[in-house]
Image (spheres, rainbow, N blue to C red):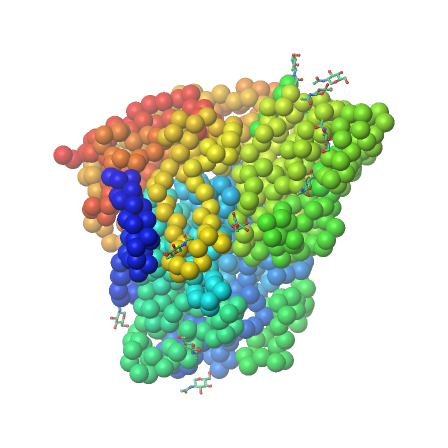
Amino acid sequence: MIRFLWQVAATASLFACSHAQSETSSSYYTSPTIYPSPNTTGIGWDGALEKAQSFLGQLNLTEKVYIVTGVRGPCVGNIAPIPRLNFTGLCLQDGPAAIRVADYASVFPAGITTAATWDKTLFYQRAAAMGQEFKDKGAHVILAPVAGPLGRVALGGRNWEGFSPDPYLTGSAFALSVEGMQSVGAQACGKHYIGNEQETQRNPTVNGEGETILAISSNIDDRTMHELYLWPFADAVKSGMASVMCSYNRINQTYGCENSKLLNGVLKEELGFQGYVMSDWGATHSGLPAINGGLDMDMPGSSFGSQTLSFFGGNITAAVQNGSLPESRLDDMVLRIMTPYYFLGQDSYPSVDGSSADLNGYNPATSNYSFTLGTDKSRDVRGGHAQLIHDIAAQGTVLLKNENATLPLKSPKRIGVFGNDAADLVTGLYNTNNLNYAGAPGYDIGTLAVGGGSGAGRFTTLISPLEAIKRRAYAEGAIVEYVLDNKVAIQSGGRGGGLGPPTGKISPKPDVCLVFLKTYVTEGYDRLNYEADWNSTQLVANITSFCNNTVVITHSGGINTMPWAENENVTAILAAHLPGEQSGNSIVSVLWGDVNPSGHLPYTIALNESDYNTKIVNQTNTNDTDPNAWQDNFSEGLFIDYRHFDQAGIEPLYEFGFGLSYTTFNISDLSISATTNASLTQLPGDTAIQPGGNPELYAVLATVSVTVSNTGEVAGAAVPQLYVSFPSGSVPEGTPVRVLRGFEKRQLAPGASEAVQFMLTRRDLSYWDVVSQQWSLPSNGSATVQAGWSSRDLPLEGELALTIEG
Ligand SMILES: *C1O[C@H](CO)[C@@H](O)[C@H](O)[C@H]1NC(C)=O
Ligand SMILES: *[C@@H]1O[C@H](CO)[C@@H](O)[C@H](O)[C@H]1NC(C)=O
Ligand SMILES: *[C@@H]1O[C@H](CO)[C@@H](O)[C@H](O)[C@H]1NC(C)=O
Ligand SMILES: *[C@@H]1O[C@H](CO)[C@@H](O)[C@H](O)[C@H]1NC(C)=O
Ligand SMILES: *[C@@H]1O[C@H](CO)[C@@H](O)[C@H](O)[C@H]1NC(C)=O
Ligand SMILES: *[C@@H]1O[C@H](CO)[C@@H](O)[C@H](O)[C@H]1NC(C)=O
Ligand SMILES: *[C@@H]1O[C@H](CO)[C@@H](O)[C@H](O)[C@H]1NC(C)=O
Ligand SMILES: *[C@@H]1O[C@H](CO)[C@@H](O)[C@H](O)[C@H]1NC(C)=O
Ligand SMILES: *[C@@H]1O[C@H](CO)[C@@H](O)[C@H](O)[C@H]1NC(C)=O
Ligand SMILES: *[C@@H]1O[C@H](CO)[C@@H](O)[C@H](O)[C@H]1NC(C)=O
Ligand SMILES: *[C@@H]1O[C@H](CO)[C@@H](O)[C@H](O)[C@H]1NC(C)=O
Ligand SMILES: *[C@@H]1O[C@H](CO)[C@@H](O)[C@H](O)[C@H]1NC(C)=O
């Protein structure tokens, strides 16, 4: 059904293009308008709405407008102080892996690394530690976490900032991140809402004739929206997320920050979101349409890019005065912003660190607003987080291959280290500015521990792989030989050339060769290649030509193909993702076995890049005359990542959920029990909306338990996973073969066993029914439940039969 409609749409658009430009837009999905913007009722934030109302009652019109319009100040985003009310303003700072604009702060493992741990405790602990650093620097609002992009396209340039293309895994990490950040009193701003799945043309451009070419439109059908892209946002709203950032792109032709269907209809009404929607920087394209469409705060509010003034500010004052905007809407915007502020106790909060102002190039002396900065500049907020960062990075490292137990290393005496990614940074500790990026893969010599753009972080400390390996080797009396410049390693040639022993740059012959590869990622650009950068495949070929014990380690902001994976001399592969500041220490822990790897892939690694079905849309230089030319039809529906590989029957190289260990595990004793014998209605009852949506969606309908045991010689952490297959025939066409619906992580001593329980909620067992506009259980309630170690390794299977009212 859905697929058929898509074909019609595509055909119609081709027709329209060749005949009349004005008809182009009508052949694509469009968004309906949903007005008015619902008022907050402060549910879940007891007592705080009253405080916000009392504050609102003291504001004059100009001051209300201050609260909703950003100004220039010491932080990346700022709301002006109102000194007469002792309100010191709001400080908003990037980003998802670190407080970016700060010194003496930690750089944490990226979202993708965190997802690869599959560890809910670490999801929360990382966020709580980050939240504490933001708070200690005086930042009220964290511009994180990220669930958009979800990771629809393997080459998406910002996938690493978020977690996984699986909405269940991302939903868990996103919601626990919100809870962790807010547990210490900082506000989380979940982003980017929604459909921001590529960087290319995420913003409008101006062509040679001065005509505006609109930003890309992500055209997403209703079911796909609910079951993939919206799913994690529902989880985070349920967790009390203070703020949501609307995205740069259009959705069904309408800009993210004025899409009333998505902001008013879906986020505030269906999901019961009580907080405020802020724009991405410069993503506001109108005043009243955006405000009526559900936007509550304009950022950065003043000069940004080509925008010199805000659509908010004085325009709102004028609109209220001339009656075109009801003041009650402005009041609701203020209440939505101030309620989480009071709920989290931010009326008593640390002052903004003066070093933030310096790093943002802000001079308080020349400001119209009286921001008060802390006098204790450059506060050290790292709070001993290095150990946690080390742990997450080690746990987020995925062991993909380990022939004949090459790893952990057995006290090698001669260690070879190769590749530009092993080296310390040589171009500064803050690589946020898309260094050398014009399709080129970032900076050359230096390890990749975090990506670029607003998701970057300034390193106060960075431990490179080479540094940590040398320290370890010295302690064990081993020698380390290295060639870090890929060009030199490649040009030297292999055996008999200038690199390999006995006559080359490397001699004696290493017992083990550690090859470090990297794949740069940064906001603003999508990736161009699936393989790791800097001639990585050739580098591996050169090293393996003389080294029959080559371990390849990747530091990558996304999916890589690995054409060298089956090379006989590549004995082990570790996908170490973006580990943050303790990079070297964490990889040494895994290589030498201090940490038994327990990471699992949060995405699928294909054998061939052509196996991926979703691509970056790129119209650059192909048509810059049609303002509406950039259209991205999400015509694959629910079939992204492993759902596509399962549906199309494609064998991956390493599947979603896969990861090896230095020990072995067994899984047994699957048992399934419904929580009620009573028959269930197919649709949830008509219960008042709470944050997260209809509360009945989260009622547990069944529990599944399994027993996991460590059958090997060393301690290790098992990651049992639960997948559900819906009864075909009782669900609409376009339903995936199986979907992740549970995972846990358990540390087990050798010989130890533990029972693990998974809870299946009504939403977990439902599909989004576009007709009733509800989550619906299949009419025949018999689902297949599978448990195991990855999306393709599921030794246990059972049936879950629910009785559905006829
Ligand atoms: C190593 O690289 C050089 C230079 O590109 C190439 O000529 C040589 O064939 C490579 N050696 C192997 C074994 O791949
Ligand atoms: C986009 O259009 C599709 C097709 O009409 C529809 O199913 C979906 O709900 C629309 N989404 C939005 C946000 O307008
Ligand atoms: C919001 O509340 C105000 C009263 O404060 C009311 O006038 C307005 O109609 C309400 N708006 C909606 C959408 O319910
Ligand atoms: C509103 O309050 C501000 C001070 O916060 C003051 O500058 C301004 O004149 C006031 N406006 C009105 C209309 O009273
Ligand atoms: C502002 O703070 C001062 C000093 O603590 C206090 O005297 C005053 O009442 C406060 N004003 C408001 C409006 O809360
Ligand atoms: C109001 O919005 C318009 C664009 O519609 C903009 O040109 C103008 O500068 C804005 N005014 C203020 C005071 O921000
Ligand atoms: C692994 O061990 C087996 C048996 O000793 C041997 O045949 C094989 O060549 C080894 N493979 C590697 C990659 O060392
Ligand atoms: C898009 O196309 C342009 C022009 O051919 C090219 O320069 C750019 O690298 C492409 N971008 C991506 C992400 O493919
Ligand atoms: C890859 O190697 C070729 C020569 O074989 C060189 O021209 C190119 O610049 C290298 N690319 C990178 C990214 O190192
Ligand atoms: C593997 O290493 C051996 C040397 O130990 C070499 O003879 C062989 O050609 C290498 N194989 C590959 C595929 O490079
Ligand atoms: C690697 O080559 C050495 C000889 O240089 C040999 O002793 C060793 O067994 C080989 N290892 C593997 C894994 O083939
Ligand atoms: C570009 O788009 C315009 C308007 O739709 C169309 O007339 C023209 O043929 C297109 N050009 C190319 C090269 O696709």
Q: How many numbered tags mark residues here?
A: 0
Q: Could you say which is closer to the camera, residue 281 or residue 90?
A: 281
Q: Is residue 592 above or below residue 465?
A: above
* Residue at left offset 33%, top offset 23%: 798
- Is residue 480 visible from the viewing direction of this image? no
* Residue at left offset 57%, top offset 51%: 522
Task: Left or right? Give the position of 480 relative to 339.
Answer: right
Q: Is residue 114 above or below residue 38?
A: above
Residue 780 percent coordinates (x, y)? 21, 30
Residue furthest to the front in view is 19
Give the image quarter of residue 769: top left
Q: Quadrant of the C terminus?
A: top left
Give the image quarter of residue 706: top left
* Residue at left offset 61%, top offset 28%: 564
Give the image quarter of residue 781: top left
Residue 373 percent coordinates (x, y)? 61, 72
Q: Quadrant of the N terminus?
A: top left
Q: Could you say which is closer to the camera, residue 726 or residue 19?
A: 19
Residue 512 percent coordinates (x, y)? 73, 26
* Residue at left offset 45%, top offset 43%: 615
Q: Could you say which is closer to the camera, residue 218 or residue 509?
A: 218
Residue furthest to the right in view is 503
Residue 141 percent coordinates (x, y)? 50, 62
- Is residue 83 visible from the viewing direction of this image? yes
